[in-house]
Image (tube, rainbow, N blue to C red):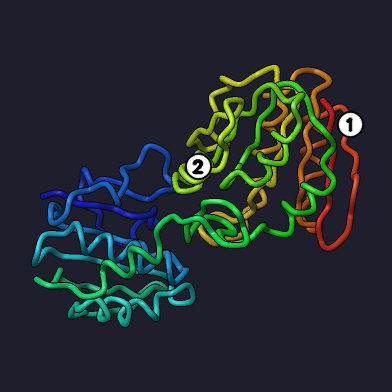
Amino acid sequence: MTTLLYGAPAPGLVDIPPGATQVSPIVPGSADLAAIPDASIDHAVILAPGGVLERDYVLAQALRVLKPGASLLAFAPKDKGGSRLRKALEGFGCTVVEDARKHHRFCHAKRPAEPTGLDAAIAAGSPRLVPGLGAWSQPGVFSWDRLDPGSARLIGQLPTLSGHGADLGCGVGLLATRVLASPAVTSLACLDIDRRAVACAEHNLDDPRATVRWADVRQWDDSLVGLDFVVMNPPFHDGGTEDRELGVAFVRTAARMLRRGGVCWLVANRHLPYEAALAAAFETATVRDDAGGYKIIEARK
């Protein structure tokens, strides 16, 4: 039996068959659900995303790849889309059996012989050139259809950079585009944990100086060292829950990448306490801007 797994359920929440193939785009090295052939899978276990376009895209792709009559288990926390899962699956023509436990809703269904609405849901959740953004993006990517305020503030404060650098958590490449506007930048490594963001960034960064890598910054292998600069807008949510250690891990990785005297420019929400991590990893850390709920920090190694 071939089983697909989308997401990382909490231990003990659901039974996952041994050897299940991970297809979440935020698990580096996972398979691409969109590339799996139609009607080729026996079973799918889906921790459904909370966003409507992303959720329906994932459910539609799962139903597309399942064999007729194959089983689908879709679930989510009640307060993060779980209460709407049954209706979404019924909209695709599924007969759903639902149960609730551990603050989650679980929907059991079988792939109908002729599901409805799959093409429309897949089209609505697919990558596209976003009007107004001027860049390729996809629902589910962080701030997928607009420049987020933190990155906008960093772009506004960023000086002209030079030499070899990196953009940690690059998203679809909007901050990197600003960095690459300087002809003095010789190379820019762009890293992101989201395969969808990486694919869009490869579209958006049509520049031989840029390389885009699908990677978890927290587990970076130190193959990038001696850099002149790092820029970043570190995430502080993991699976929808605030995790301040994410930003701390980004700070530590940036310090390992930089040469002595190299500089890190970062933006953070004002309430996030990165000062101790910056003080431990860098020679100096100076707040260059503090407005609109964000602080821009220049840290020098």
Where in the figure is residue 83, as x and y percent of width and height? 40, 80
Query: Residue type at mark 1?
Result: Thr
Q: What kind of element bears circle 1?
A: strand
For image coordinates 30% across by 73% down, the residue present is 106
Q: Is residue 108 above or below residue 38?
A: below
Q: CA distance from mark 1 to mark 2?
A: 36 Å
User: Is residue 178 or residue 247 the one in the foreground?
Assistant: 178
Percent x, y of residue 139 = 47, 61
Residue situated in front as seen by the camera: 164 or 80: 164
Q: The residue tagged with tag 2: helix, strand or loop?
A: helix
Q: Residue at x 15, y 68 (%)?
A: 111
Q: Are marks 1 and 2 in contact (CB under 8 Å)?
A: no
- The earlier-in-sequence mark between 1 and 2 is 2
Tell me the kind of residue under disc 2. Answer: His
Q: Quadrant of residue 254?
A: top right
Residue 122, how many percent across, how many down?
33, 63
Q: Is residue 244 above or below residue 283?
A: below
Please state which of residues 47 and 174 is positioned toward the viewer in this rendering.
174
- Residue linked to disc 2: 203
Q: What is the number of the mark on residue 284?
A: 1
